[in-house]
């Protein structure tokens, strides 16, 4: 009964925008969204742009019902991305952070998005066009430690595709498989960040967000030259399971970021130093988290 789910969606969004309590958030994520449509709905967000998202999809639920997404990273970006900045969104998803970057930098800046999923690529492009952000450019490519062709494989949960992620099309880059030969995957072009930096020749880079389901270590290795040269602020996802699935580890990600001469922080009502014990506690309790890496003054490695 589409009319019933539409009423639930509209009432839920109206309530969520006015009273986004913890109790109502739990109800939305655990119960209400399951009765909502997989279809994309156009909504206005609290950050001042439109998005097309599914109220049922786990990654679109917060945007649809509450007009917001990942408040710590959103807040960090608003504090560290000025007008006119040059930003890269590596693993753009449906485009929340690409649009946020575009809103913050304005037409004086530029944003490049990188997305391996064909579904996500089309969604982020549509959301960028919806807002008229001509300075945000979308690229249907994976980012890794070397260029070539890889296999983008969907993430599975409990032996089947995660039904909570219907429209999110989450996946990871599998170099071990023969591209195009494995069931359930799709061939995708792979670039390195250094190659892209040489191609666009922007002369500077101010902010990079990395959330690519375990390929963060490889992406940093493939961007070492440009990161060393431009010293952008980094926001990097830590996900132990995803890293291990791609043949890397939390320790390897730590070493790569430290090797670039960055200090790492987490967001807890402001930036707090990230140490090993805190990192493990976050991974054990949350499964994943974002680390915020700021360049140290010295550029020597």
Image (spheres, helix red, strand yellow):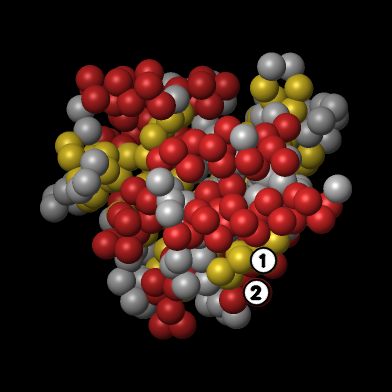
User: Can see residue 202?
Assistant: no
Question: According to the image, label 2 marks what residue?
Answer: 130
Tell me which label, 1 or 2, sits earlier in the chain. Answer: 1
Measured Cα–Cα span from mark 1 to mark 2: 9 Å
Q: Quadrant of the C terminus?
A: top left
Residue located 41% across and 26% down the image: 286
Please tell me whether residue 260 is drawn above or below residue 123 in the rendered image. above
Q: What is the number of the mark on residue 246?
A: none
Residue located 77% across and 41% down the image: 187
Where is residue 153? Give x, y as percent: 71, 32
Observer-nearest of 10 and 151: 10
Nearer to us of marks 1 and 2 is: 1
Where is residue 170? Give x, y as percent: 65, 39
Residue located 70% across and 61% down the image: 41
Q: What is the number of the mark on residue 42?
A: 1
Please tell me whether residue 89 is drawn above or below residue 155 in the rendered image. below
Helix, strand or loop status at disc 2: helix
Q: Is residue 156 left or right of residue 100?
A: right
Q: Counting other residues with Cα less than 10 Å from the Cα at mark 2, is it few (<14), some (14-19), or many (20 or more)?
A: some
User: Can see residue 183?
Assistant: yes
Where is residue 243? Give x, y as percent: 49, 26
Residue located 38% across and 51% down the image: 71
Q: Are marks 1 and 2 in contact (CB under 8 Å)?
A: yes
Where is residue 21? Give x, y as percent: 40, 46
Please tell me whether residue 66 is drawn above or below residue 36 in the rendered image. below
Q: Quadrant of residue 101?
A: bottom left
Helix, strand or loop status at disc 1: strand
């Amino acid at each position: 009964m589409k009319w019933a789910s539409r009423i639930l969606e509209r009432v839920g969004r109206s309530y969520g925008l006015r009273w986004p309590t913890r109790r109502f958030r739990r109800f939305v994520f655990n119960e209400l969204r399951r009765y909502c449509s997989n279809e994309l709905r156009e909504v206005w967000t609290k950050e001042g742009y439109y998005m097309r998202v599914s109220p049922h999809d786990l990654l679109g639920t917060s945007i649809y019902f509450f007009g917001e997404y990942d408040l710590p990273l959103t807040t960090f970006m608003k504090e560290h991305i000025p007008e006119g900045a040059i930003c890269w969104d590596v693993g753009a998803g449906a485009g929340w952070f690409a649009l946020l970057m575009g809103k913050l930098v304005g037409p004086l800046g530029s944003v490049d998005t990188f997305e391996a999923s064909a579904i996500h690529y089309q969604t982020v492009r549509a959301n960028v066009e919806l807002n008229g952000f001509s300075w945000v450019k979308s690229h249907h490519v994976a980012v890794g430690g070397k260029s070539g062709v890889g296999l983008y494989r969907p993430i599975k949960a409990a032996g089947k595709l995660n039904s909570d992620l219907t429209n999110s099309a989450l996946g990871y880059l599998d170099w071990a498989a023969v591209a195009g030969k494995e069931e359930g995957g799709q061939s995708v072009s792979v670039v390195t960040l250094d190659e892209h930096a040489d191609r666009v020749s922007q002369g500077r880079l101010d902010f990079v967000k990395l959330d690519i389901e375990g390929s963060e270590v490889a992406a940093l290795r493939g961007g070492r030259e440009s990161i060393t040269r431009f010293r952008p602020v980094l926001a990097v996802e830590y996900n132990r399971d995803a890293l291990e699935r791609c043949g890397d580890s939390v320790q390897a990600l730590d070493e790569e970021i430290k090797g670039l001469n960055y200090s790492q922080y987490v967001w807890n009502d402001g930036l707090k130093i990230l140490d090993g014990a805190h990192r493990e506690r976050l991974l054990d309790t949350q499964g994943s988290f974002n680390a915020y890496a700021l360049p140290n003054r010295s550029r020597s490695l």
